[in-house]
Amino acid sequence: MKTGQTIVELAQELLDQQESKRDFHARSKALNMLPTGQFRLETKDSEVVMPATGYAHGQMASKLNMPKVYYDRMLRHCPGLLAQNVNHWLAQSEDTSLIRSLRGEMRAVLSDRYRIVDHNDILAMVLPELAEMGDGMKIASCQVTESKMYIKVINTNLEAAISLNDPVHAGFILSNSEVGSGSVSVEPFIYRLVCTNGMILKDHRQRKNHVGRVTENHNLYAIDTLAAIDNTFKLKLRDLVRNAISITTFREAVEDLQVAKTAIIVGNPVKAVEVTAKAIGLNESESELVLSNLIRSGDLSKFGMLNAVTRSAEDVESYDRATEIERLGSSVLYLPASTWREVATAN
């Protein structure tokens, strides 16, 4: 599992962020792109100039139906041309946007119907629930990135063995986005003690739940109605956390991992990794990490392959991508039989 922040560091980071957040509800045509690549927003009281994150630029490209590859190319090599294109289409828009900024940087361009669920609110709801669940609940890794917050929790009281001296714990990962990159999500997590690898269960045996982004226009509702909506959300999140670690799901996953140890790679390991990488969506550098980990482990089985994938997450710079690679470990576990045969016999 990729090392992130401690829960104390995460809480401090969220506190620091809270003091520098600004949100603007404004007509899209009030937003203009400057030749420098920055954005200027005209509000009722002032004019705000902000650089934009890569994520916000991606949202702007999507909002204006501009191909992301071409948008990025213009941003790098001809920002003035990009500004002309962006400003032309913004001027044609009649909608209202929610512009989210942090530390003076535009980080999201969202619909004004987007209902905000901030990280600090999620943390305030989750920590008391974890405390009530007992001493066995351990926060193993946290991180807040440009697009998401992650909290990875292990239940040290729920343990099983894949084989002799190879124990695993059950756990879950909670994620949230403040910028439109997905709603609140809780996913089962398997933590292997031998190598501290983590695998998120994302396939057909997963228990993945989404709550959070409420699309109703909150301007239409009274304060007590909004309070009731918020309370319902809190109750949903409480239930998701309390039921995040299903004993049945954990036991099924352990059984599947045990079976995976018997699925042997009989072909060329290099080719096996190439086929696996193509099947689950790894790039060339990630594929090289997987091959190195597979050879180092000496475990030429499906179990060895999925652990080589999840171990690679530790060496990826991006915490977002590392978490996605931990999901891809379960993609290996639940590869279609025909695809696994292709992996196992590749030459």
Image (spheres, rainbow, N blue to C red):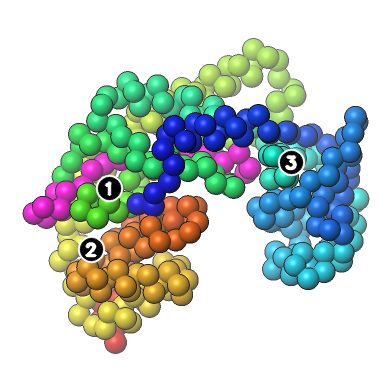
Residue 105 appears anywhere in the view: yes
Q: Mark 2 = which residue?
A: 303
The kind of residue on which mark 2 rests is Phe
Q: Which mark is residue 104?
A: 3
Q: Mark 1 = which residue?
A: 191
**Residue 159 lies in quadrant:** top left
Q: Residues within 10 Å of mark 3 (few under 14, many from 20)?
A: some
Report the span colored magenta.
161-182
Q: Mark 3 against mark 2, which lies toward the viewer?
A: 3
Q: Residue at x 33, y 74 (%)?
A: 291
The kind of residue on which mark 3 rests is Gly
Cβ atoms at labels 3 and 2 below 8 Å apart: no
Q: Mark 3 against mark 1, which lies toward the viewer?
A: 3
User: Relative to residue 80, is residue 167 depicted above or below?
Assistant: above
User: Relative to residue 60, is residue 268 depicted above or below?
Assistant: below
Residue that extends furthest to the bottom in the rendered view of this protein? 347
- Is 251 left, or right, of 126 in this rendering? left
Q: Residue at x 73, y 33 (%)?
A: 22
Horizontal and vertical percent position of residue 230:
57, 22
Q: Residues within 10 Å of mark 2 (few under 14, many from 20)?
A: many
C-alpha distance separating marks 3 and 1? 38 Å
